[in-house]
Each structure stands twice: as structure tokens, then as C-alpha cells.
Amino acid sequence: MPFMGGVETIERIRQEDKDVTILIVLAHSDAKYLTNSIKAGIQGYVIKPTSMEQLIEVLEALIDCIKAKQTQKAYHLSL
């Protein structure tokens, strides 16, 4: 990001849409950056390099999370 860092970008996205699912891909395992990203509201992360199996596992978990949110939202709308 030329004008803002990753955590700031996550925070800006959260300001616009608190429900969007955010997955970050990191080139390094900086614990402080990852902690700040989690606090900013990410749902998942992958540290490169990663295997295809690991990436699929993370994406499937995020899909399950999205489906659960949609089910919960539909339930609340039906009340």
C-alpha cells in the first residue's frame, strides 16, 4: 500500500463495512503486526510461503464463518 499500511487499511475497511470478511497474507510472521491486524478485525491470515492445502483450509473456514453470519442475519430478519 503506497499511502497507508495494512493495519490502517483494515481499519478503514472496517469503518466502511464492519461485516466484510478480511483475510491477510503475510510475507513474514511479525507477532506485533499480526496482533494489531487481529485487533483491527481480520478473520484469518496466511503466512507465506504456504501450501495449497493450508490455503484451502483457511478459505474453507472463512466460508463457514460467512455462511454462519448469513444464517444468523436471516434468522434475525425473520423475527
Image: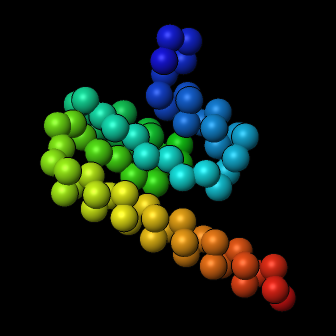
Colour basis? rainbow
Residue placed at 49% from the left, 31% from the top?
Answer: 7
> Which quadrant of the view contains residue 4?
top right
Q: Residue furthest top?
A: 2
Residue 28, compared with residue 1, is above or below; it is: below
70 horizontally vs 6: left or right: right
Percent of width and height locating residue 8: 55, 28
> Which quadrant of the view contains residue 24?
top left
28 horizontally vs 69: left or right: left
Residue placed at 28% from the left, 62% from the top?
Answer: 57
Percent of width and height locating residue 46: 29, 45
Is residue 32 at all visible to an observer of this figure? no
Residue placed at 65% from the left, 55% from the top?
Answer: 19
Percent of width and height locating residue 23: 43, 46
Q: Residue furthest bottom?
A: 79
In depth, the one of 47 and 35 nearer the eye is: 47
In depth, the one of 76 and 51 nearer the eye is: 51
In depth, the one of 55 and 7 nearer the eye is: 55
69 horizontally vs 44: left or right: right
Percent of width and height locating residue 9: 56, 29
Is residue 52 at all visible to an observer of this figure? yes
In depth, the one of 17 and 37 nearer the eye is: 17
> Which quadrant of the view contains residue 68?
bottom right
Q: Quadrant of the C terminus?
A: bottom right
Q: How many marks?
A: 0
